[in-house]
Each structure stands twice: as structure tokens, then as C-alpha cells.
Image (cartoon, rainbow, N blue to C red):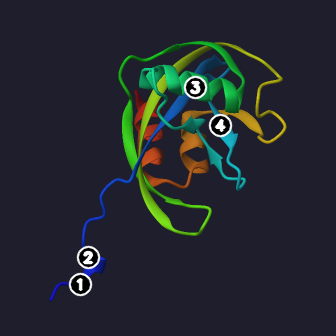
């Protein structure tokens, strides 16, 4: 008999994240936002019917981080797999594609501004702030590029 705890769990959800970047005083900066639980994350959400993944990432960047204008990469910088905890406490596997957005304009007021904090940090600092190993690796690679 096999032990199910060693079985591979397939991806149950697909998400899109926005790696929002700008040129700061000390080099490239990445825009981080807080999650509903207070962790630092990239703006992210679900694919949207009728939208390309990059377009959906741009919409999430607006709703969660106030990015009004930016140029979205055609292809994702990378993807990572992480465990999501549902509202019922269940663990589910989500694969998140990360799209780079070169930010040219942000707004102070955006749909979720009352629920989220945001800050611009170096890619190296962003890698230290996040809890997902796969996202940390993407940010470290971006910092070196």
C-alpha cells in the first residue's frame, strides 16, 4: 500500500501576479503590497475571462497597488507554486505566473487603498520580505538581471 502523503498534489488554481518596477534614486525598485493577512506580496489575482494574462495582471496592479499606467511584459518573468489556505482552512496548490510591469504612473487612491499598505523597495529587499520560496527566487533573479 502506498502512503498518500508522498503523492504529488496537482495544481488546483492558477493566479497572475504583477511585478511592478520603476527606476528609483538608488536603482530599480519593486512595488510591494500587503495581503489580507498583512504579509508583503506582489499584487495578484485570478485570470479574467476575455483578458490576456498580462492584462489581468495590470488590472490587479491597479486595484491592489494603484498602478494607473505601465507597460506589461508579453511573457511572464517566471512562475512559482505555493500553498493557499482557503477560508475554510484547507490547503490548496496555486501556480502563479509573474508579469513585469514598467510603471509610469501611480495614484494615491485606488480601489483597495484603504485595505492595503504599499511600498517601493529594492528587488533584494522584496526577496527578503516575501514568504514564498518560488517568488523569492524570481525576485532574486530579477535583482541580478
Q: CA distance from mark 3 to mark 1?
A: 42 Å
Q: Are marks 3 and 4 in contact (CB under 8 Å)?
A: no
| Disc 1 packing (10 Å; few <14; some 14–19; many ≥20) | few
Q: Position of residue 69 (x, y in %)?
A: 64, 11
Image height of 39 relative to 21, above or below: below
Of labels 4 and 1, earlier in sequence is: 1
| Disc 2 packing (10 Å; few <14; some 14–19; many ≥20) | few
Residue 144, image quadrant: top left
* Mark 3 lies on residue: 20
Q: CA distance from mark 2 to mark 1?
A: 6 Å
Q: CA distance from mark 3 to mark 2?
A: 37 Å
Q: Are marks 2 and 1 in contact (CB under 8 Å)?
A: yes
Q: CA distance from mark 3 to mark 4?
A: 8 Å
Of labels 3 and 4, earlier in sequence is: 3
Query: Helix, strand or loop at disc 1?
Result: loop
Query: Helix, strand or loop at disc 4?
Result: strand
Q: Which numbered disc covers residue 32?
A: 4
* Mark 1 lies on residue: 3
| Disc 4 packing (10 Å; few <14; some 14–19; many ≥20) | many
Q: CA distance from mark 4 to mark 2?
A: 34 Å
Query: Helix, strand or loop at disc 3?
Result: strand
Could you tell me if residue 7 is visible in this image? yes
* Mark 2 lies on residue: 6
Question: In the displayed structure, does residue 79 sit left or right of residue 37?
Answer: left
| Numbered-mark total | 4
Of labels 4 and 2, earlier in sequence is: 2
Q: Which numbered disc covers residue 105?
A: none
In the foreground, 77 or 61: 61
User: Which residue is painted at 78% across and 25% down in the image?
Assistant: 110
Question: In the displayed structure, does residue 139 sit left or right of residue 65?
Answer: left
Question: Of discs 3 and 1, which sits in the foreground?
Answer: 1
Amino acid at each position: 500500500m502506498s502512503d498518500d502523503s508522498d503523492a504529488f498534489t496537482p495544481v488546483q488554481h492558477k493566479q497572475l501576479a504583477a511585478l511592478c518596477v520603476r527606476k528609483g534614486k538608488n536603482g530599480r525598485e519593486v512595488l510591494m503590497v500587503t495581503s489580507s493577512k498583512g504579509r508583503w506580496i506582489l499584487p495578484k489575482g485570478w485570470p479574467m475571462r476575455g483578458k490576456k494574462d498580462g492584462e489581468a495582471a495590470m488590472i490587479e496592479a491597479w486595484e491592489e497597488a494603484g498602478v494607473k499606467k505601465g507597460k506589461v511584459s508579453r511573457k511572464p518573468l517566471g512562475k512559482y507554486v505555493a500553498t493557499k489556505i482557503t477560508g475554510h482552512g484547507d490547503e490548496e496548490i496555486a501556480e502563479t505566473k509573474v508579469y513585469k510591469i514598467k510603471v509610469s504612473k501611480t495614484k494615491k487612491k485606488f480601489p483597495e487603498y484603504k485595505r492595503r499598505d504599499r511600498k517601493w523597495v529594492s528587488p533584494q529587499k522584496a526577496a527578503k520580505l516575501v514568504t514564498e520560496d518560488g517568488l523569492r527566487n524570481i525576485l532574486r533573479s530579477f535583482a541580478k538581471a
